Image (cartoon, helix red, strand yellow):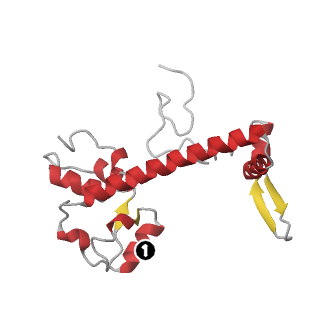
Amino acid sequence: MNNKETKPGRDSKGRYIKGHNPNPKGRPKKVPQKPTSSFDVIFDRKITLTAADGSCRELTAEQALQHATLKAALEGKAGAINRVVKWLIKRERWIRKEAEKKAARAKKYDGAYLPNHFFSKDPENADEALQILGIAVRDPLADHLDPDRIRLVLENWAVDMALLRWRGSEPLTAGEIQAIEICTLDEENLSWPKGVRV
């Protein structure tokens, strides 16, 4: 038998008694991390630039450096021109990739079967609430399906959460999977839990 005195809120074996909170103050709040390097401190700063017409504009240090690089490139400096060309190439690749995504989504709508309940006349304020909450966004590619109503597509996180709660006994059919993909903003990056689809 242990001769040590039992601490308040614990049983004879030293375990906490049910209903007793060992940490009444709660978990300590996380202290925001300060930038670790002088480089981070510089890039977090805001810089106020005054234009030739006298108007002022506030920019981050990164934006100010980009403006200075662009100005140097226009003046003919080789290093700055090289940097700006890299930016343009990166931007063109991004634009091309986004155009390919839009084309793929538009192709999916051609001949796709969508049940009538996808086009029910919901109150417009419900659509607005979904957009404000970040659950859905407007899908401009679907304007030709029903021009009288703005069609929304669901954000991936909302569909992922719904799929995690799916409790069906059978996997989803090909038609149901297609309907989910059509109603999702970025269907390629959906997280399908095991057993939801064949």
Q: Residue at x 46, y 65 (%)?
A: 133
Q: Position of residue 162 (x, y in %)?
A: 31, 54
Q: Is residue 48 left or right of residue 140?
A: right
Q: Is residue 54 left or right of residue 191?
A: right
Please tell me whether residue 131 is drawn above or below residue 190 in the rendered image. Answer: below
The answer to which of 4 and 167 lies nearer the viewer is: 167
Q: Residue at x 36, y 74 (%)?
A: 150
Q: Amino acid at mark 1?
A: Glu
Q: Position of residue 79 (x, y in %)?
A: 75, 37
Q: Residue at x 50, y 44 (%)?
A: 20
Q: Answer few, some or many: residues within 10 Å of disc 1's Cα (few below 14, many 20 plus, some between 14 and 19).
A: some
Is residue 34 visible in the rendered image? The answer is no
Please tell me whether residue 130 is drawn above or below residue 188 in the rendered image. Answer: below
Please tell me whether residue 135 is drawn above or below residue 36 in the rendered image. Answer: below
Name the image quarter holding residue 179.
bottom left
* Residue corresponding to mark 1: 128
